[in-house]
Image: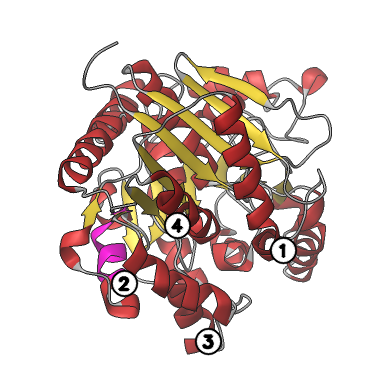
Amino acid sequence: MPSSQLRIAMLSAHSCPVGKLGTKDTGGMSVYIRELARELGKQGHLVDVYTRAHDPKDRQIYELNQNARLIHLRAGEDDEIQKLAVYFHLPEFVSNLENFRKQNNLQYDLIFSHYWLSALAGTYLQQWWHVPHITMFHTLGAVKNAITEGDCLVPGESEPELRIETEKDLVQKCHHIVAPTEREKTELIRHYGALSEKISVVPCGVNLEQFKALDKTQARQYLGFACPPHMKYGGSQRNNDKIILFVGRIDPLKGIDNLIKALPYLRHIQGLRLLVIGGGEHSQYEIEQLRKLACNLKIQNSVTFLDLVKHEQLPYFYSAADVCVVPSYYESFGLVALESLACGTPVVATDVGNLESIIRQGETGYVIKDNTPHRLADKIALLLSLPNTDIKSARLIRASVSKFSWSDIAEAIVRDCQVVLASYCSPVS
């Protein structure tokens, strides 16, 4: 056992890292936790990820990788519940976590929590265990409210004052904060008075072994776009169709309505298709509203909602697409853009998260100042007017995100952990 080995208790109370991606509360954060835990385990560290049991069929322990595992704990009923409702079950979550730790004679060097609910649970554990607590918020309630309340044209529900006040308290109580972008660091300081020296910026990563450029024709054939007898996803798509792809949760803040509104500006492009990946049973109302929008615009035959897709299937969709669009009003980072670029597919995105520094303007895609339909359409049209991306240019697009491998991200997190441990002074019992 190496002397530099870390023993990390990772907390993801409300969202299961092996849950169905694209549902209401399972997205980029779940990918981040799962991939980071696996990579930390691969590098020789011991990681236990604790989450709330959300299905009676869940096993208590799932092996994520060597040295990394996921542990389900009871907190309320073993069923999906509304995210804010998890707050009221945090005492049970923390109590069952401590019981599990004692029963299995576990000791941890530090806590790494994700999202404000988990960070709140972590504040109790940091006091019990006398170890440092690092947190990552992933999204900030104050920023979401500034977006949804500051402009009546921006959709979305306001975050409760409970979250805002809790986050403000957490930035004081946690020993260190990891922000995925300089922008989020600035927001933490502006809205919550966080100390600059307490925050490090470490970007999200992408699994470069899973997300890689595949031959476009073969990817479309695999998905059924070019083989009518075996069509699985695409209806009547032809192999030379122009495909626009959206991947993510079906949420008003994702700006999918504006992407649909952009399609009439692109009527001159033959065989244009928009594929929307994401949803789940809790998103049916939002999907139905988007279907109605497409019908009102008389473009319903050009929009296909594919609901949830297994994560391992996504590289085929990215590779089959001509352009991936991230029309969000708010992203903490923009993981979908990373995945698309790793597959060699250019991206059009609003200026959210860290996308301005990830997307090379005019080379690997475009970042636009807002998600108004005509701006989205202009840049989508520019990319679709180019000759079909060949394997060489796909490789160049992929190469632009090579520094975001999970091994690099994990090493940066380990350096942060070591700095925090070196400066931590255990309180006198």
- Where does the image place residue 205, in percent across and percent down from the top left? 35, 37
Rendered image quadrant of residue 69:
top right
Residue drawn at the location 26% of the way across and 46% of the way down: 202
Give the mark nearer the N terminus: 4 vs 2. Answer: 4
Whole-number angstrom distance, CA of label 4 to CA of label 3:
30 Å
Give the mark nearer the N terminus: 1 vs 3. Answer: 1
Mark 3 packing: few (<14 Cα in 10 Å), some, or many (20+)? some
Residue drawn at the location 78% of the way across and 51% of the way down: 76
Whole-number angstrom distance, CA of label 4 to CA of label 1:
19 Å
Q: What residue did someone put label 4 on?
A: 123
Mark 2 packing: few (<14 Cα in 10 Å), some, or many (20+)? some
Give the mark nearer the N terminus: 1 vs 2. Answer: 1
- Residue 106 visible in the shown view: yes
Q: What residue did someone put label 2 on?
A: 187
Rendered image quadrant of residue 230:
top right
Q: Nearer the viewer, mark 1 or mark 3?
A: 1
